[in-house]
Image (tube, grey):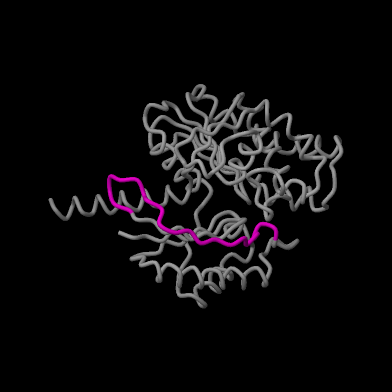
Amino acid sequence: MRLGVLDIGSNTGHLLVVDARGGAAPLPAYSFKEPLRLAESIDDDGAISQVAAETLAAFVGTALEVAETKGCEEVIGFATSAVRDATNSDAVLDLVRERTGITLDVVHGEDEARLTFLAVRRWFGWSSGRLAVIDIGGGSLEIAAGLDEAPEVAWTLPLGAGRLARRWFREDRPRTDDELREVRRSIRAAVAKDAGSLLRGGAPDHAVATSKTLRSLARICGAAPSAQGPYVSRILPAAELAQWIPKLAAMRHEQVAALPGVAANRAHQMLAGALVAEGVFDIFGFTELEVCPWALREGVILERLDRLSVRAGLAGA
């Protein structure tokens, strides 16, 4: 079947069209995305601005037209941290439904971590042993770990790169050591609070990174470009990242945007994302993270296919 997955993230709206069937990897057929920056459009009362909500509704409408043009039998639409945490979440979802006819499901933080973990497990397989999966989104950080397809532990923290950039790095200027120290202290205290739930299960055999932020950081640190395809191993090393953080702190946004693998609309978030990654490395003792090309969207697709397979099996019984 041809399936459309409409992912309303904290940074970007993304429609991924895939050809999918049970027992096979989803095959990407088309991608349509636009920067929405919802995490940075939240006002002091915690509400998504009316302008951002209107922009979101317009994007969803266009994405549904694209999905129809590309022959999708079904479109699964969901929203993550920015919409989930907004004080006017219901109003934003109602606006989208009224304008477009689609109901966006709000993926809760633990489910986001769980579905991302499922995608990573399917990508790397059982030979990876105990997996730890780190996902830095625009609005939140998801962490999950376990031996099976469902993680033993999964939690979410409000440490997304966009959210932190809005809080700590609004001005486009170099950052002082004192500023970085304050941000580091805040990030590490938040990550360390529940770190024991992962560490008690033992050291992971394989530590994995997903999300555009971590892929970009890996590319900055020397990983292969996306043009070389999804099957090339890409590593984000802790030592290399540590060397890059002071460089990123000294750069303006246009300089960061000129680095390999960095999109212009995400350049202002890279320092914040790097500090979160650094905190994860230090708290959990990881020396590197391997980048997985699959993440939440693929997890949603795989779970949908699993359910279809179960129904087909019951119907044939």
Within the magenta stretch, is there residue 259? Answer: no
Q: Please report the residue visible at 60 percent of the width from the left and 34 percent of the height from the top.
A: 194
Percent of width and height locating residue 230: 46, 41
Within the magenta stretch, is there residue 33? Answer: yes
Percent of width and height locating residue 45: 73, 62
Side (left or right) of 171 relative to 191: right
Q: Specify the farthest residue to the left.
A: 317
Q: Please report the residue visible at 39 percent of the width from the left and 67 percent of the height from the top.
A: 70
In this rendering, the answer to whether 3 lies above or below 283 is below
State how many labels appear.
0
Q: Please report the residue visible at 41 percent of the width from the left and 41 percent of the height from the top.
A: 118
Q: Specify the farthest residue to the bottom.
A: 99
Percent of width and height locating residue 280: 63, 32
> Quadrant of the image for the N terminus?
bottom left
Nearest to the observer: residue 317 or residue 301 = 301
Nearest to the observer: residue 90 or residue 232 = 232
Percent of width and height locating residue 40: 70, 58
- Image quarter for residue 193? top right
Q: Specify the farthest residue to the top.
A: 202
Side (left or right) of 166 relative to 52: right
Q: Please report the residue visible at 62 percent of the width from the left and 43 percent of the height from the top.
A: 216
- Image quarter for residue 219? top right
Q: Which residues are magenta?
A: 20-40
